[in-house]
Amino acid sequence: MNRVDRLLALLLFLQSRRVTTADQMARHFELSLRTIYRDLAALGDIGVPIVAEAGVGYTLRPGFHLPPVNFTAEEANALITGSLLVGHLTDASVRPPMQSALAKVRAVLPRDQQDRAIRLERAMTLTATVEAP
């Protein structure tokens, strides 16, 4: 994983937890504590409001969140495939939230990935059905 990807992953990790320690981050990313400290400093240098409390851990300042996520083509394809499976293999109560979530994913995709996503959805055919209990 290159440094930019690692910094983004670290930021997402921080965003997904109320508080975490440098040791937890090092174990999660299989990095040294020194690398975690350097990466936290780099995030701070670019304006990410990381709050550190001795003996407690690190957190992001309340109210801070990332702008919309950009998915790779592979991630978008995986989400679309999963949504199609959900649509065909679950009951009707799950479909509207899944369609709503997928619409949000599509909205943040670059235009070329949106076109690919549409082609993928049209090309996929599922023959599985859910039997009523």
Image: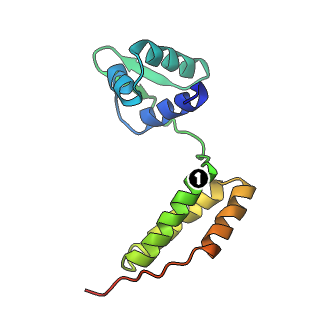
Q: Amino acid at mark 1?
A: Glu
Dot 1: within a 10 Å radius of its alpha carbon, few (fewer than 14), some, or many (20 or more) residues? Answer: few
Residue at position x 58%, y 56% from top? 76
Q: Is residue 38 left or right of residue 107?
A: left
Determine which quarter of the picture holds residue 103: bottom right
Toward the bottom, the furthest residue is 132
Residue at position x 64%, y 54% from top? 108
Image spot of residue 61 (x, y percent): 46, 29
* Label 1: element kind: helix
Image spot of residue 85 (x, y percent): 45, 71
Residue at position x 58%, y 74% from top? 124
Circle 1 is placed at which residue position?
74
Residue at position x 39%, y 25% from top? 30
Toward the left, the furthest residue is 133
Q: Nearer the viewer, residue 62 or 118?
A: 118
Establish if 58 lies above or below 79.
Answer: above
User: Quarter of the image containing the N terminus?
Assistant: top right
Establish if 96 lies above or below 79.
Answer: below
Q: Nearer the viewer, residue 128 or 132?
A: 128
Image spot of residue 14 (x, y percent): 43, 32
Q: Nearer the viewer, residue 8 or 72?
A: 72
Q: Is residue 104 left or right of residue 26?
A: right
Establish if 17 lies above or below 84.
Answer: above
Q: Nearer the viewer, residue 106 or 18?
A: 106
User: Quarter of the image containing the C terminus?
Assistant: bottom left
Image spot of residue 86 (x, y percent): 43, 71
Q: How is the image coloured?
A: rainbow
Establish if 117 lies above or below 22.
Answer: below
